[in-house]
Each structure stands twice: as structure tokens, then as C-alpha cells.
Amino acid sequence: MKILIIDRSGFQLQTRKMLLEEELGESVDSASTLGEVFTAYKKGLYAVVVIDHEIENGQQCVDHILSIDPVQNILVVSTAIHCVIKRCGDCVNNNQIRRLFNPTPIKNIIRLVEGFRGYKCDHYDEETNKLDV
């Protein structure tokens, strides 16, 4: 299982990358800019893409990935209330997108990467089709 992590360059990116590699024993590639995502992302190459949605061009990174592979497993880490897809439940039902609210411990990211399809977004309420924070 290969993983792509998209985050601001610096300590947090390197720490997340290192801990994911150590805990999962898998290869982890990283990208920090939209240009790097355009270069790095290829359909079928990554089991999971982890993205800090708050980075510059974060939504464009998600949009680019989904334009190539609409069912790519994507874990979005963000403090934003809004979803990366227009209708909240579509992330899980039509795409393979899950989200965690930042700040989140690395153990939660590892847990979600390992059991990706078994989890839904943090605070997602299926009845109201909204995130309850």
C-alpha cells in the first residue's frame, strides 16, 4: 500500500510522513504544492491520499485527484466545517472521501488509513446529512 500525503512543507509534513512509514511499514510520498500534486498523483498508484485541506490550493488538489480517479481513497484533515464535495454524504456514498478535524493525533490518521473503508467522517450525521460539530 503506497500513500501520498499532501501538506505544507516543514516539520508537520515530515513528522506525519515518518510516523506513517514507521507504523504502517509502507512507502509514503509527499507533496506540498499543487504543481507537486500534478506531478506525483497517478491513478492506481496510491491506496490512500492524505491531505491537509487548509494548505494553499487544497481544494484544487482534491479536485485534481477526483478528476483523474473519482473513487480514490482520500483522507481530508481540516478545521473547516464545509465538505470538499457539494453534498456532505456524497463524500462517503459516491466518492471515497473521509475527513478528520484538525488538530488530530497521528494515531487517528494511522487508524483511518489502515481501516479506511470502515469509517465515515468525524461528526457526520446521516439523518441531517450534515457535520455536527
Image (cartoon, rainbow, N blue to C red):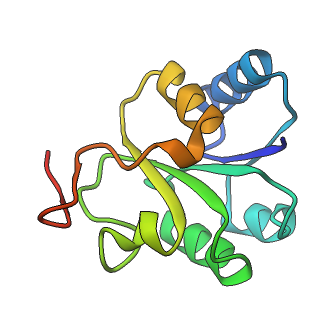
| Residue 113, percent from left and from top | 62, 37
The quadrant of the picture occupied by the C terminus is top left
Q: Is residue 57 visible in this depiction of the protein? A: no
The quadrant of the picture occupied by the N terminus is top right
| Residue 80, percent from left and from top | 28, 54
- Name the image quarter holding residue 63: bottom right
How many labels sit on residues?
A: 0
Q: Is residue 10 left or right of residue 89?
A: right
For image coordinates 67% across by 65% down, the residue present is 72
Q: Is residue 118 left or right of residue 103?
A: right
Foreground residue, 4 or 119?
119
Q: Is residue 33 visible in this depiction of the protein? A: yes
Residue reaching furthest to the bottom: 67
| Residue 12, percent from left and from top | 58, 28
| Residue 4, percent from left and from top | 74, 48
For image coordinates 22% across by 60% down, the residue present is 126
For image coordinates 80% across by 54% down, the residue present is 46
Foreground residue, 121 or 56?
121
Above or below residue 75? Residue 90 is: below
Q: Is residue 130 left or right of residue 15?
A: left
Above or below residue 114? Residue 37 is: below
Foreground residue, 72 or 28?
72
- Name the image quarter holding residue 42: bottom right
Q: Is residue 128 left or right of residue 24?
A: left
For image coordinates 46% across by 52% down, the residue present is 98
Above or below residue 93? Residue 75 is: above
